[in-house]
Amino acid sequence: MATEHELNATSYIQHHLTFKAQAVGDHPFWTLYVDSLVVGLVLGVVATALLWWVVRGATSGVPNKRQAFVELLFGFVDDQVKGIFHGKRDFIAPTALTVLVWVLLMNAMDFLPADIMAWILTHVFHQEEFRIVPTADVNTTFALSISVLLLSIYFAIAVKGLRGWIHELFCAPFGAHPVLWPFNFLFNMVEYISKPLSHSLRLYGNMYAGEIIFLLLWLWAATSLSGAFFGAILGVGWSIFHILIVVLQAYIFMMLTIVYISMAQESH
Amino acid sequence: MNINLTLIAQAISFALFILFTVKFVWPPLMRAIEERQKQIADGLAAGEEGKQQLEASGKLASEELGKARARAAEIIAHAEKRGLQMIEEAKISAKAEGDRLVAGAKSEIQQEVSSAKEGLREQVAALVVSGAEKILQREINAQAHADLLNQLKREL
């Protein structure tokens, strides 16, 4: 616990849930959460670099274990995409792979014990407040979901043309009668807003809740010896359960990405 | 839960990661995988072809074997027939030879018999003549009575 003042529950949790903020403008919007950004970037770079490294040495002959693992991953993602998306998968499949790997790694940061990481960050990197789970930051999840939304709009326009897309905006799903235009438009807007909202908030909520539960367990562990004992046991339990959540949420996020983009390409 | 510039920065990094994956990570490995799939498919097809060929050549071999067996049986039958025929021929020729020998012997015997008869006749004729000479007490001209003697010889 790196705080100077007396330890209590509120300050402990607040401390762990404070972002490393860097203001770059006057308005509160012009702030960068350096921790989310740096962790996200490092994980993304490490993951893509690893994949690239394996792929560059890829052979069509007998693969080594490393390549076989990456191929399994590719095959898994490709199969998922194949099941949902009908068309050329040149873009959507690698996108899904990127989403899966990146989100999985960012989620997995939750497994690192919060207080040990806080100690390392404080004493090695001299960062007092630093959150290591980028997906427990709405900015990250919204960045992903809004990117997916933009991609789906782009693909919708690419497939149907701008006219076709606008036509569909006003004439589907209820009908092409002019009286129905506002209702159609309203309906479509609700869809377009709800998609990225649910997409991002699902992931954010799961990761944030997971983090909070860990913090509560560690808080209990700090109270007494028995608290430490039971806190550790429950911490292990929650970690094991959290493996499921981490993988499942990354999987769901990838599947929804595929579904949203392929939905955009189909006409009503 | 503050929305701020981080969102845009994360979106940019997301876009860059997607681009990198689309351009540099996905295509080479997919190519390798597809190539291997093709190799495996080709290998399986070749195996299937080999199996079919084996089956076909097995069939051919058994066909040839059957033909050879039939031919061998034919040859054996032919040989047996020929053997029987030869035995038959040998029997016939042996019989003929035997018959010929028997006939030869018979004619020889006949000759012997007739020559013996001839000798006997001569002797008997001589005996008769000398007997007659003795009876007549005089010499009979053999020359003059040859006709008579020959007649006697024939009657003997």
Image (cartoon, coloured by chain):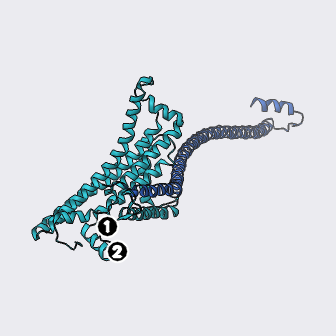
Chain colours: A cyan, B blue
Residue lying at 33% horizontally and 65% vertically, measured from the top left: A20
Circles 1 and 2 in contact, beta carbons < 8 Å:
yes
Residue lying at 37% horizontally and 33% vertically, measured from the top left: A187
Indicate the amino acid at tag 1: Phe
Q: Nearer the viewer, residue B75 or B111?
A: B75
Q: Which mark is residue A125?
A: 2
Pointer 1 residue: A130
Q: Nearer the viewer, residue A64 or B70?
A: A64
Dot 1 crowding, Cα within 10 Å, few <14, some 14–19, many 20+: many
Q: Is residue A127 above or below residue A10?
A: below
Residue lying at 49% horizontally and 31% vertically, measured from the top left: A167
Secondary element at tag 1: loop
Q: Is residue A4 above or below residue A152?
A: below
**Please, which residue is most extreme toward the bottom here?**
A123
Say if residue A83 shows up in the picture.
Answer: no
Q: Could you tell me how far apart the alpha carbons at marks 1 and 2 are, in whole angstroms?
A: 10 Å
Residue B126 is left or right of residue B91, and the answer is right
Residue A261 is left or right of residue A162, and the answer is left
Secondary element at tag 2: loop
- Choose top left, top right, bottom left or bottom right for residue B116: top right
Residue lying at 25% horizontally and 57% vertically, measured from the top left: A210
Chain letter, disc 2 residue: A
Q: Position of residue A226 (x, y in %)?
A: 10, 68
Q: Which mark is residue B148?
A: none
Chain letter, disc 1 residue: A
Indicate the amino acid at tag 2: Phe
Q: Position of residue A76 (x, y in %)?
A: 41, 51
Q: Quadrant of the C terminus of chain B?
A: top right
Q: Is residue A182 above or below residue A124?
A: above
Q: Position of residue A44 (x, y in %)?
A: 42, 61
